[in-house]
Image (cartoon, rainbow, N blue to C red):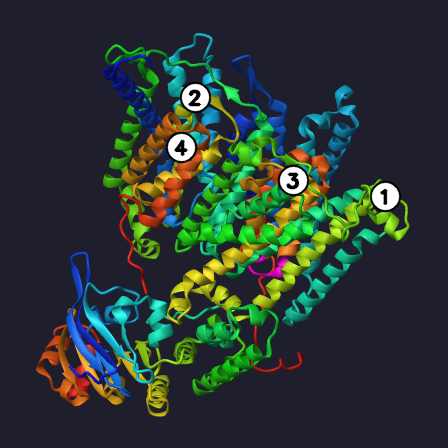
Amino acid sequence: MNPSALLQVEHLTMRFGGLVAVDDVSFSVAQGAIHALIGPNGAGKTTVFNCLTGFYKPSVGRITLNSPESQATFLLEQMDDFRIVRDARVVRTFQNIRTFPKMSVLENLMVAQHNHLMRASGWTFLGLIGAPSFRHAEAASVERAEYWIDRTGLAEYADSEAGALPYGEQRRLEIARAMCCDPVLLCLDEPAAGLNPSETEQLSELIGYIRDHHHISVLLIEHDMSMVMGVSDHIVVLDYGQKIAEGTPEEVRNDPAVVQAYLGSDDDETDNAADTTT
Amino acid sequence: MGHGDGRAHFYVMDYFAQQFINGISLGAIYGLIAIGYTMVYGIIGMINFAHGEIYMIGAFIALMVMVAFGIGEGGLVIVALLSALLVSMALTSLYGWVLERVAYRPLRGSQRLAALISAIGMSIALQNYVQLTQGARVKTLPPIIQGGFEFQFGDTDFIVRLSALQIMIVLVTIALMAVFALLIARTALGRAQRACQQDQSMAALLGVNVDRTISLTFVMGAALASVAGLMVTLYYGVIDFFVGFIAGIKAFTAAVLGGIGSIPGAMLGGLLIGFTEAMWSGYFSIEYKDVATFSILVIVLIFLPTGILGTPEVEKV
Amino acid sequence: MRPPFASPLLRDAVLVAGIAGVLAFPFVGLLLTTQGTAPTLSTRFPEFAGAVVLIFFGRLGISAARRGHSLFPIVLGIAMATVGAFSLLFETTGMAADSAAPWHAFVPGTFLATVASAGGVAIAVVAGRNHLLRDSVPVAQKPLPMKQLLLWTGIALAGVAIVLPLLPAVDRRLIDVATLVLTYVMLGWGLNIVVGLAGLLDLGYVAFYAVGAYSYALLSVTFGWSFWVCLPLAGALAALFGILLGFPVLRLRGDYLAIVTLGFGEMIRIILLNWYDFTNGPDGISNIGRPSFFGFQFAAKPAEGTESFHTLFGIAYDPVHRLIFLYYLILALALLTNAFTLRIRRLPVGRAWEALREDEIACRSLGVNPRNTKLSAFAIGAMFAGFAGSFFATRQGFVSPESFTFIESAILVAIVVLGGMGSQIGVAVAAIILVGLPEYFRELQEYRMLAFGMGMVLIMLWRPGGLLTHREPTIRTRPQPASA
């Protein structure tokens, strides 16, 4: 294992009763790179995400995050979900979109800056009296939110209810919201699901932009193979909860175990994997 | 006390046995009400707040039928009881059906709180409907099932009583439970109910009539509650328009304690609540018996949120 | 000649009246009474028949109006209203006793008569409106400028509230009712933080109201402290209770939380009822200190060495001064609650509450600490209930556990949900409808709670989202473009 990696997952195992959803999986995510986690349906990808972000407590394993700025090390498997976001700054999105539907897009992005703003508002007391320091902090937060609203092409919706946005815009809103948490590692759970090819293309650009201009590492679960192969620096393949392959897109594409796993299943990914292999 | 150690020991045992018997009979009644809560919660995920009132209505109707048969004036006890049981079950079921049809079904698919508010509104309306039409004063029924067994352990003067009524309550409860378990396990209706519990839209796609299944769930819950109402009337001999509220909360506690959605759980929870209440009243203070019940509710929900027989729920992320 | 719509409507009305008849027979048609220990059963068939006939015609009229018929339901409604009104006249003037008027048998009892006349009028009005609207061409509706509309409604309501006691037509009774309504408005606004903003269904809110009332009562009676000293203390104690009770249970999901808070509410009431040494049990605490106007008593003869409110202003003593003062006191407290809520909604914690209501998992994925956020909502909501509780104690001069039953919590939750979950004006409107109207029609006192319960159901069925569902974002990117 690479000790200088941003995130290190070692021997991660997650059992639900008798079912082993994730079985002794180890991998690492390098600083400033895009990693993808792929595999057939039910391979345990989302479970890995849930363990990384504290929504599940893994049965066995260690998840280490080496913060690039503060040099601190966090053991994510021991932390509560909201502390992982607040302290270790690992932020995720969801496969089934989870916006705050009745709040506006801007409000969604303000909630993402909650901890920062809470401190600035003196745990509400400074905010109640309208202290200038809080007003400045709030203005800065709005600016940051507007930056990501522009980046994700949501400008025309900024003051609309999030729940009223078209599907693709809601997906982008989730990414913008995650970016407002100021992450060091961004975990995207099937961000291209339900998007049309041109939207997927935009999404790839956005993910690349996040890596290149903000030097943020991205961990990606995705079924769209052309997108994964195009955008990823490194790919980990799961099947039945186990890691069956890992490497660059080129290596994974030619790995017989991967071809086997995909051809063995009847999913549409089969075609995608076969396409990209040729 | 002047008694020897051995006698004091017998006294303690006797007292405990008496409270135990009382607790079981009370628990059987709570269990029957709890089934209505647990089934409705299992299938549509709402607390049927008016279920306690359904039970109260069942008790009133049963009492009326018994009085109509001339109870207390040497009428035919068995005929009166059976008629009371059947009429009360039929009418109370109709109340349950109408309740769902009028106050809950139009709100399915609205925000969750809407149905709960509607249920609270129905609970208040039904309580006041009975108070207005029948008056606020308690209605009494003289004991009509008498006799029983008396036990005496050792040579203390404390007599443990097991009344025929208590035996009847437990037997009726067991019989209903058995019928009920068969109904759920073996019939098409039971299968439909279980299917709706898992996934309503899938059940509908597979040809289950979801509306009908939910209606029948309310009907069954109401029928069982009316039996509980009849038995409470016989057991305590006193009812009023307000009996449904506290009994409803206790029965709901029982359903949660047993594991919401689980019918054996509701029965087990009912027994535990009845038992706790009897022991608490017997050994501590009768004024605080409701506090004891609520404390159990809080403790169970904190440490065992899925109840004793409930299935643990994995948070869907 | 048979009207073409008759048969399905008739069948429906017969069915509904039949089911209602079966349901109502034991309760309306029979009467259980207890003589000595023996229960007896008597019959009330005229009332029962009247009720069934009423339901039949009512249903007939409603479905006819719904299907767009106009002439028939209008005639039917007017007929019902007329019969009902005559009947009501007979009942209330006592003529019924010695009159053999035929319609008396059809609509017996004040209640049925009232329902018949009100229902008849409603049916006629709805049908009449349908008739008028039928020929009008639907105009493309412009979306209402809700923000301005709500703002002006709020200002108008506040203005009316401020000048109300000074209006010439206003008597003591109206001030009393208005004070009561304002107490519920304040409690509703406090609970709105918990239920409307944070989405935590609290069915035991009355517990904090009780804590506030008893805190003030005990502090006032034991130490003789003044209202203004006790008010913040009562709020703080209630907030502390909120944290203590909230800490163990706030991770529970919606309905479970509801039932546990209900349990807590009842527990507090039972403890107040049984802890004689501390609370004086069911007898309650009396002689609680009355509030003073910054030290000036509202009394005809002030205590030695103090001055009274009326001597201060050189006016004649009038007991209504105290009522008006209490009215303005609760108005000020309520407006404070409102201002606080409006402000805190725009702060990070307020947004976190609303986000928590929308999606707790998403909140956690953004680093929001759900426990602390919920606790803060619970504690602040409890604090306002504590303030309102001490106002209640000082207004009554007496508190007992009887005032803090579950029904109060239910009314408050109903106010918040009917108002529209989070809408401040909605809460005020709902409080006026649910508390003010029934309180003002004291003649129908007996039927108040029945009507209240049915009203809750009907309003939910009519508007499942609440009366006012508009939500204004707490922050905007740029100034709103001028509405065209």
- Residue at the disc numbered 2: B236
Dot 2: element = helix
Instruction: Please name the amino acid that badge 1 sits on.
Output: Asp
Dot 1: element = loop
Instruction: Please name the amino acid that badge 3 sits on.
Output: Val
Q: Label 2 to label 1, Cα distance in Å? A: 54 Å
Read off the chain for label 1.
C
Front of the two marks 1 and 4: 1
Q: Label 1 to label 3, Cα distance in Å? A: 26 Å
* Residues behind callouts 3 and 4 on a single chain: no
Read off the chain for label 3.
C
- Residue at the disc numbered 1: C318
Q: Is residue C421 magenta?
A: yes
Instruction: Please name the amino acid that badge 2 sits on.
Output: Tyr
Region rendered in magenta: C420-426
Q: Label 3 to label 2, Cα distance in Å? A: 41 Å
Instruction: Please name the amino acid that badge 4 sits on.
Output: Ala
